[in-house]
């Protein structure tokens, strides 16, 4: 007779947690074999689920703090670099002279330099570019000479002669009653045949001013103020210079 069935034997093997001998009898009593039951391996994790959860949350918080630190650093760097970026852009600008003030029928005021005109339209160069206006939309056109600053050179510039370039250093003064913005000095070098050899310009070292557009300049010159300038002009080899001309460009903003 069979003493222990297969299903019952399986249950016993799973339930036992220690080493013990068990005898399994076949059809003939006494014909059995001793089976050694080995203890089950401990499959529990090294740390509890609660401990692993806490570590995961700590790493997440650390990653979040690192991301926030990175954002703060980028914001600080942006604030520190913005004025330099504005100065670099401004030094490459070539602002037009503001010689005319055009008032439109809707009340808009456009200031700039009139470059062309016909019976129906006129084109005015502004700080934002060329603008074509219909004369039917214009109420009045006024000269802006009374609003212009009066910028003059203070004596001759000192020149430093080098093999590849010339450096012109000097001062200018605003003796007008309004401020000059983006004041720039231009030097042109000519040969004996009145041919242009080289030209370059530089913004003056004036006062710093921030405009409503967010642009910041360090080349503004108020009434009665003086400013230094340094203009470096590269001179091609083999091109002798006979004479030099200079001029002042500026813009006026409210």
Image: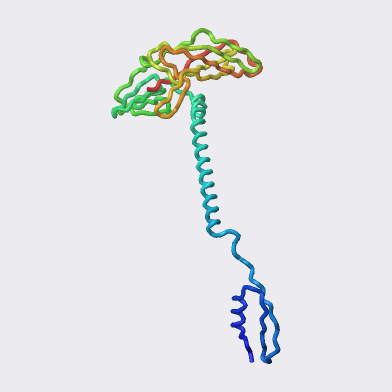
Instruction: Report the coloring of the rendering.
Output: rainbow
Residue at point 46% right, 12% down?
A: 226
Residue at image position (62%, 13%) is 161
Number of disc labels: 0
Q: Is residue 137 above or below residue 207?
A: below
> Is 39 above or below relative to 158?
below
Q: Position of residue 95 (x, y in %)?
A: 45, 23
Nearer to us in this view, 150 or 110:
150
Residue 222 falls left or right of residue 73? left
Q: Position of residue 87 (x, y in %)?
A: 50, 26
Q: Quadrant of the N terminus?
A: bottom right
- Pick out the residue farthest to the top: 155
Residue 85 placement, left or right of 7: left
Q: Which quarter of the figure has residue 113?
A: top left
Q: Nearer the viewer, residue 128 or 240?
A: 128
**Residue drawn at (59%, 15%), measured in percent from left and top?**
167
Horizontal and vertical percent for residue 8? 59, 82
Which of the 4 image quarters holds residue 176? top left
Depth check, front residue: 34 or 159: 34
Position of 243 with respect to 29 (left or right) is left
Q: Give coordinates of residue 125: x percent, y percent.
A: 42, 25
- Seen in the image, is 120 located left or right of residue 79? left
Quadrant placement of the C terminus: top left
Q: Nearer the viewer, residue 209 or 193?
A: 209
């Amino acid at each position: 007779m069979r003493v222990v069935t297969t299903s019952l034997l399986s249950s016993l093997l799973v339930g036992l947690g220690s080493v013990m001998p068990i005898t399994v009898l076949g059809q003939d009593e006494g014909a059995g074999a001793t089976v050694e039951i080995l203890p089950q391996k401990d499959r529990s994790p090294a740390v509890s689920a609660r401990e692993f959860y806490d570590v995961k949350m700590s790493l997440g918080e650390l990653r979040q703090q690192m991301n926030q630190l990175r954002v703060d650093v980028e914001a600080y760097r942006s604030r520190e670099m913005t004025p330099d970026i504005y100065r670099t852009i401004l030094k490459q600008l070539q602002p037009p002279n503001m010689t005319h003030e055009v008032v439109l029928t809707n009340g808009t005021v456009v200031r700039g330099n009139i470059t062309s005109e016909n019976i129906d339209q006129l084109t005015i160069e502004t700080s934002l570019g060329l603008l074509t206006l219909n004369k039917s939309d214009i109420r009045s056109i006024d000269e802006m000479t009374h609003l212009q600053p009066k910028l003059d050179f203070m004596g001759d510039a000192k020149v430093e002669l080098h093999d590849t370039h010339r450096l012109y250093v000097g001062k200018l003064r605003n003796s007008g009653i309004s401020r000059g913005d983006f004041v720039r000095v231009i030097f042109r070098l000519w040969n004996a045949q009145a041919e242009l050899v080289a030209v370059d310009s530089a913004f003056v070292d004036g006062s710093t001013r921030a405009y409503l557009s967010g642009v910041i300049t360090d080349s503004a010159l108020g009434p009665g103020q003086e400013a230094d300038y340094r203009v470096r002009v590269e001179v091609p080899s083999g091109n002798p210079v006979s004479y030099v001309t200079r001029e002042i460009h500026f813009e006026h903003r409210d």
